[in-house]
């Protein structure tokens, strides 16, 4: 994997924004020596780096191994009954509107907010249905769209 030249990107952003080190430091709220150190190879914290890029009208993009842009996970993913997000590494399935008979036989929580498969089950299900780690977890907004489609006019 190719490492990014953060110092070079900061210098590029400063040039695009047409700012001196002192002017950039004043806008970002750090000392001029900090900008000098960053341009010399010291890594800035992420917030400072993003602020420097933003001043130049630039942004960071995360790409996968195929060169496709990767979007962040949505913020409104389904949560458990305590309000915690479900584990990001597991596939979460929204509870059905009506509980299937097999769930009643299994016992336990009859009306779960969401559930997930163990990794071995998850991998088998992903292979079976052609899913991958890039498929999204259900969100509150996606569930609302599904419910709206089911309603009769």
Image (cartoon, grey):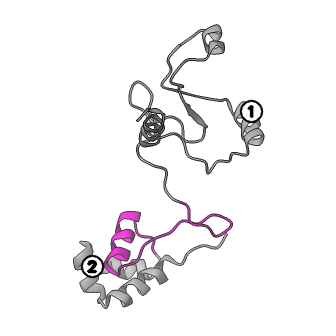
Name the image quarter holding the C terminus: top left
Query: Residue 25: which numbered mark, if any?
Result: 2
Give the residue at x 68% y 65%: 65
**Residue 25, position as x, y percentages in the image:** 27, 79
Please, what secondary structure does the residue beneath circle 1 have? helix
Q: Which of these two is toward me, 59 or 40? A: 59
Give the residue at x 68% y 67%: 66
Name the image quarter holding the N terminus: bottom right
Residue 95 in the image: above or below residue 132: above
Residues rendered magenta in the picture: 42-70
Give the residue at x 37% y 88%: 16
Please, what secondary structure does the residue beneath circle 2 have? helix
Mark 2 crowdedness (10 Å alpha carbons): few <14, some 14-19, many ≥20? some
Residue linked to disc 1 = 120
Q: Which of these two is toward me, 16 or 14? A: 16
Query: Residue 80: which numbered mark, if any?
Result: none
Mark 1 crowdedness (10 Å alpha carbons): few <14, some 14-19, many ≥20? few
Give the prevailing secondary structure in the magenta stretch: loop
């Amino acid at each position: 994997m190719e490492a990014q030249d953060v110092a070079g990107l900061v210098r590029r952003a400063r040039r695009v924004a047409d700012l001196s080190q002192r002017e950039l430091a004043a806008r970002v709220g750090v000392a001029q020596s900090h900008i000098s150190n960053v341009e010399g190879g010291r890594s800035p914290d992420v917030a400072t780096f993003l602020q420097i890029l933003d001043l130049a009208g630039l942004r960071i993009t995360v790409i996968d191994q195929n060169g496709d842009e990767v979007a962040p996970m949505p913020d409104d993913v389904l949560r458990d009954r305590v309000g915690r997000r479900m584990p990001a590494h597991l596939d979460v399935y929204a509870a059905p509107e009506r509980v299937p008979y097999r769930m009643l036989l299994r016992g336990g929580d009859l009306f779960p907010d969401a559930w997930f498969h163990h990794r071995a089950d998850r991998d088998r299900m992903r292979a079976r249905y052609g899913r991958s780690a890039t498929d999204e977890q259900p969100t509150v907004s996606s569930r609302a769209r599904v419910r709206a489609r089911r309603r009769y006019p």
